[in-house]
Amino acid sequence: MLICYLGSVLLVNTGAVDENDIVFEIDIYDGVTGNLVHTARKVTVPVRRWHQIDAILAKHAPGTTQGYVQIRTVSGKNSFLAYAVINDGAAPGQRSGDGAYLAAQD
């Protein structure tokens, strides 16, 4: 189980153990209230591949302006990497637009 703050979320299947996909569930929490607002199910990452979910709040939790995710492995034995990228500014042209990398915490 990993927790990270969000923007876009990226998952990597390392393929360190076997040739199988990893299937995840991603719980999305409202950063203001701490309430669970959505669970993305059956997020599958093939072996030695990566999967990025851009604009995860807009796609899976509309109306949530800030939040964090909890990532769970549903199936698969390979180790994985997870991180998020957030941008300064709510829309293009606002604030600096700089992106920041946020490593997941175990």
Image (cartoon, grey):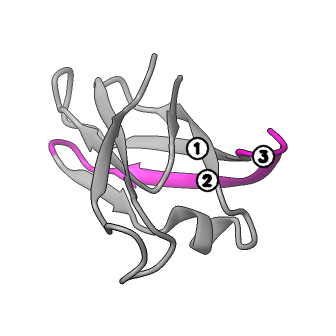
Residue beneath disc 1: 25
What residue lies at 15% left-to-right and 43% top-to-bottom?
48
Q: Is residue 20 left or right of residue 65?
A: left
Picture coordinates of residue 98, whole percent (x, y): 28, 61
Q: Are marks 1 and 2 in contact (CB under 8 Å)?
A: yes
Q: Amino acid at mark 1?
A: Glu
| Residue at 20% in and 27% down | 18
Residue at 31% of width from left, 48% of height from top?
A: 100
Q: Residues within 10 Å of mark 1 (few under 14, many from 20)?
A: some
Indicate which disc, 3 or 1, sits on the residue closer to the N terminus.
1
- Disc 3 on helix, strand or loop? loop
Q: Quadrant of residue 13?
A: top left
52, above or below 19, in the image: below
Residue 77 in the image: x percent, y percent? 35, 23
Count neighbours of disc 2 (C-alpha within 10 A) and say few if under 14, some if 14 to 19, many if 20 or more.
few
Distance from disc 3 to disc 1, alpha carbons, whole Å, reads 22 Å
Say which residue label 2 marks. 41
Residue 58, by quadrant, is bottom right
**Which disc number belongs to residue 32?**
3
Mark 1–mark 2 Cα distance, whole angstroms, equals 5 Å
* Horizontal relation, residue 12 to residue 25: left or right: left
Q: Earlier in the sequence, mark 3 or mark 2?
A: 3
Residue 56 in percent (x, y) is at: 53, 63
Q: Are marks 3 and 2 in contact (CB under 8 Å)?
A: no
Looking at this rendering, what residue extends furthest in the bottom direction?
93
- The amino acid pointed to by label 2 is Arg
